[in-house]
Structures are given as structure tokens and as C-alpha cells.
Image (cartoon, helix red, strand yellow):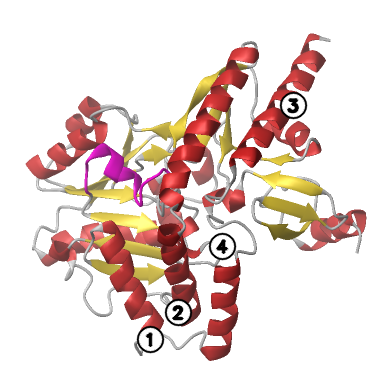
């Protein structure tokens, strides 16, 4: 079917919970995507930091095909080899001790919430149920995770939010300190706020949270759904801040495009979710586990964390140059590794630039109202980074001319 027919069918059959751009994608190759008419796009979205190995990576596609033939799902009434090996390899790669597997970042974050509360229940500290979260944070779309997130608009119309969750400004240690008390179970934080505008934690902020949590006997938990699996240049972004959480939520890049989520915890929390207190039907299935094992291996063998740092530096320089060339539209750039943003002036809406960029063959996303987000695959080449920057410059030139005209 051609694009107009497919778009009409989509508008008839799909719930309008998203605002997709007016193209229909059909296939991908590396950092490129092609629509049903064969037009090429440079993919600097990568499924929103999901397709870390790009599209059609031969190792990942081979693994998925072979494992699909061998075994896809057995339920958690039984062990499966791929999941046991993944748990070991993921813990070794991150420094954590135990793993729980699910299907998405929202599920992983909800598992963290339940873990924190149940941990203190197990210790007899039943008053410790409160979570300190942050304004502009994003942790998912379930009822619990939209409450944990710091965007009020995502909670409107869904009834009373989950009790016991408070929000403070990101980066404000004193605001966190003012909320600490004997009823706090955990501080939950993103090392880099992704959906909130690609905001890296200020210097000393995460270390300060670790200290506050320790002083008050609470947990420090992290959401590395968008930042994990090498996206920022290290396996976990927290490594670059010298801070280790008690538990961390992962998803997105972990499966390289195949749905999987995980919660990793320290050994001190190994008994905090005893048998029967939590679960996931598809969590840890052999197919997803095999895909994630391949992602971890390829990230290591192909040096993709080092590449994320090098290509991230190149992208950073390019975005800084573009921002300097278009001061009426841009304020600068920010980010870590290959999680980057071009920060726009307050009167320029990021969403308004997505269409013009797409028309020039560049796919990017908005992060907040005034940030254009760049999350290309970790396998992206120098030439593709340069091409993306050139297309962005063309987009801003055209938009600036239209505004002035």
C-alpha cells in the first residue's frame, strides 16, 4: 500500500495516543531508515535511544532468528539458559549483583518503586513509603510511573495519583534535603533527564543525593532507561559521576530494538522482593534474553562505548557550531555521549522543527518544549554525524528565513 492509504487506515484503526509524523517507515539499514516509497532518512532517533546497534545488525538479527526457532517463551515457572546467562553478564558489566527482568522501562521503574517500599516493609520500617522524585522527570506511562514522573500534564484525567510521591527541582540538593525524613524509602533520579530536555546532573548533585540517602537510611535508585548500555559513553551514565545506586532501571538499548527491561540491585536488596511479591509473564523470556546478550557482546567487541564518546564529541562540536550560526533560534547544546540536545530559544518550539528536518532527510525528536534530541545508533559513523549536522543547519536556515520573512 502507498503512504496516503496507509495513513488513512492508521487514522481509522489506531488510537490517537501519539502524534506520528506523516511518513510510513518500511525498512532500515545501520543508521538509515527508508519509507514505503523508498525515500532515505538519517535516523538520529533510533527508536528514542533503543536501536543502539542500528537497524538490521547481522549479529542481532541472526541471534533473534536462531533463538526464535530454538525457544521463545517458557514462563517463570521454569529457568531458561539464556536468562540465567544474561543476568550474570549484565551484573558483571554493571557492577550490580541481582537482576529482575520485565518488558519495558515503565515496568522496570515500577519494580524499583515496589522494591523500595517492600524493602523497608521487610525490615519492619513500614512508615518508609515516600519517594522523592524530580520535576521534569520521565519514568513511564503506567499509573505509578506517571506519578513518579515530574510532568503534571501526563497525570490529568486519570484520577488520584499514587500517594507518597513528592517532586523537587532537578539539581537542587537543598530541596531534597528539606524533604528527607524517616518516612522516605528512596530518592529516584535520572543521571541525565532525557524527556525533560536532555539535562545532565549538575556537578556534585548525584554524589550529594548518595550522601543524603545514606545519612537518612534511605535508598538511592536510578532510572537509566535512556542513558544505559553505553549511550553516554559508559555502560551506565552514573559511572561518569562516580556514584553507585542501590537499584537501577534499564530498558531501551538493552535489547537493541527487542522489548526487554531490567531492574538491577545490590546484594543487600536481594531479599526485598520475596517469592510471589512481583512478576512479569514475559519477563526474562529466552528470546529477549538472547537478544540482550548479543547487544552486550557487540557493544563490548565493537568498542561502542568508546565510539559513543568519540562520536558524541563530534556531534557536540557540530551542534555548538550550528547554535552559534543561528543565535536567533538557538541557545546552545548539552548532553553526554550520544544523548545530545540542541537547546532552542524560549520562543521556538522544538516540535515545529521536526517536520522541516524530516523533509531534509533527518529524523530527530523533541525533548521538552525547546530541545531537539539526538540519539543516533551507537554504530553511527563520523560521516553520518557530519551529514546530520549539515541537514540540521539547512533546516534552521530555512526556518529562520521563513520567520524573518
Occupied quadrant, residue 400: top right
Q: CA distance from mark 1 to mark 2?
A: 8 Å
Picture quarter with the C terminus: top right
- SS category of the residue bearing label 1: loop
- Within 10 Å of disc 3 (Cα), the crowding (few <14, some 14-19, many 20+) is many
- SS category of the residue bearing label 2: loop
- SS category of the residue bearing label 3: helix
Residue 50 vs 58, above or below: the answer is above
Q: CA distance from mark 4 to mark 3?
A: 28 Å
Q: Which residue does the image show at 8% across and 40% down from the upper left? A: 215
Q: Mark 3–mark 1 contact, CB under 8 Å?
A: no
Q: Mark 1–mark 2 contact, CB under 8 Å?
A: yes
Mark 3 or 1 closer to N-term?
1
- Within 10 Å of disc 2 (Cα), the crowding (few <14, some 14-19, many 20+) is many
What residue did someone put label 4 on?
Answer: 257
Which circle marks residue 80 in the picture? 1
Give how far across and how far down residue 188 sits, in percent.
29, 46
**Residue 238 lies in the magenta-colored region:** yes
Mark 1 or 2 closer to N-term?
1
Picture quarter with the N terminus: bottom right
Mark 4 or 3 closer to N-term?
4
What residue did someone put label 3 on?
Answer: 395
The residue lying toward the viewer, choosing from 375 and 352, is: 375
Range of residues picked out in magenta: 232-244
Amino acid at each position: 500500500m502507498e503512504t496516503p492509504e496507509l495513513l488513512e487506515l492508521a487514522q481509522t484503526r489506531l488510537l490517537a495516543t501519539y502524534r506520528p509524523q506523516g511518513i510510513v517507515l518500511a525498512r532500515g539499514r545501520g543508521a538509515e531508515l527508508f519509507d514505503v516509497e523508498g525515500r532515505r532518512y538519517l535516523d538520529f532517533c533510533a527508536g528514542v535511544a533503543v536501536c543502539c546497534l542500528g537497524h538490521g545488525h547481522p549479529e542481532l538479527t541472526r541471534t533473534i532468528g536462531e533463538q526464535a526457532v530454538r525457544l521463545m517463551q517458557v514462563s517463570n515457572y521454569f529457568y531458561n539458559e539464556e536468562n540465567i546467562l544474561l543476568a550474570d553478564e549484565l551484573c558483571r558489566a554493571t557492577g550490580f549483583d541481582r537482576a529482575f527482568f520485565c518488558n519495558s522501562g515503565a515496568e522496570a521503574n515500577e519494580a524499583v518503586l515496589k522494591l523500595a517500599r517492600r524493602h523497608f516493609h521487610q525490615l519492619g520500617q513500614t512508615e518508609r513509603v515516600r519517594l522523592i522524585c524530580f520535576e521534569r522527570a520521565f519514568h513511564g506511562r503506567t499509573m505509578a510511573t506517571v506519578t513518579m514522573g515530574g510532568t503534571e500534564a501526563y497525570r490529568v484525567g486519570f484520577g488520584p495519583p499514587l500517594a507518597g510521591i513528592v517532586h523537587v527541582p532537578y539539581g537542587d540538593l537543598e530541596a531534597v534535603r528539606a524533604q528527607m525524613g524517616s518516612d522516605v524509602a528512596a530518592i529516584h533520579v535520572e543521571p541525565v533527564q532525557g524527556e525533560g530536555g536532555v539535562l545532565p546532573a549538575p556537578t556534585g548533585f548525584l554524589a550529594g543525593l548518595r550522601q543524603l540517602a545514606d545519612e537518612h537510611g534511605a535508598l538511592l535508585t536510578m532510572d537509566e532507561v535512556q542513558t544505559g548500555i553505553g549511550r553516554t559513553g559508559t555502560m551506565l551514565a552514573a559511572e561518569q559521576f562516580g556514584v553507585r545506586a542501590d537499584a537501577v532501571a534499564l530498558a531501551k538499548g538493552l535489547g537493541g530494538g527487542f522489548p526487554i527491561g531490567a531492574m538491577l540491585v545490590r546484594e543487600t536488596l536481594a531479599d526485598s522482593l520475596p517469592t510471589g511479591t512481583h512478576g512479569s509473564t514475559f519477563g526474562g523470556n529466552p528470546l529477549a534474553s538472547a537478544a540482550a546478550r548479543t547487544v552486550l557482546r557487540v557493544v563490548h567487541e565493537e568498542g561502542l562505548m568508546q565510539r559513543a564518546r568519540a562520536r558524541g564529541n563530534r556531534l557536540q562540536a557540530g551542534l555548538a557550531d550550528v547554535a552559534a550560526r543561528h543565535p536567533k533560534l538557538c541557545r546552545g547544546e548539552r548532553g553526554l555521549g550520544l544523548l545530545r540536545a540542541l537547546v532552542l530559544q524560549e520562543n521556538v518550539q522544538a516540535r515545529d522543527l521536526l517536520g522541516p528536518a524530516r523533509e531534509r532527510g533527518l529524523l530527530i525528536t523533541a525533548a521538552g518544549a525547546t530541545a531537539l534530541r539526538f540519539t543516533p545508533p551507537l554504530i553511527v559513523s563520523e560521516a553520518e554525524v557530519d551529514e546530520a549536522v549539515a541537514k540540521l543547519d539547512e533546516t534552521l536556515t530555512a526556518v529562520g528565513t521563513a520567520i524573518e520573512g
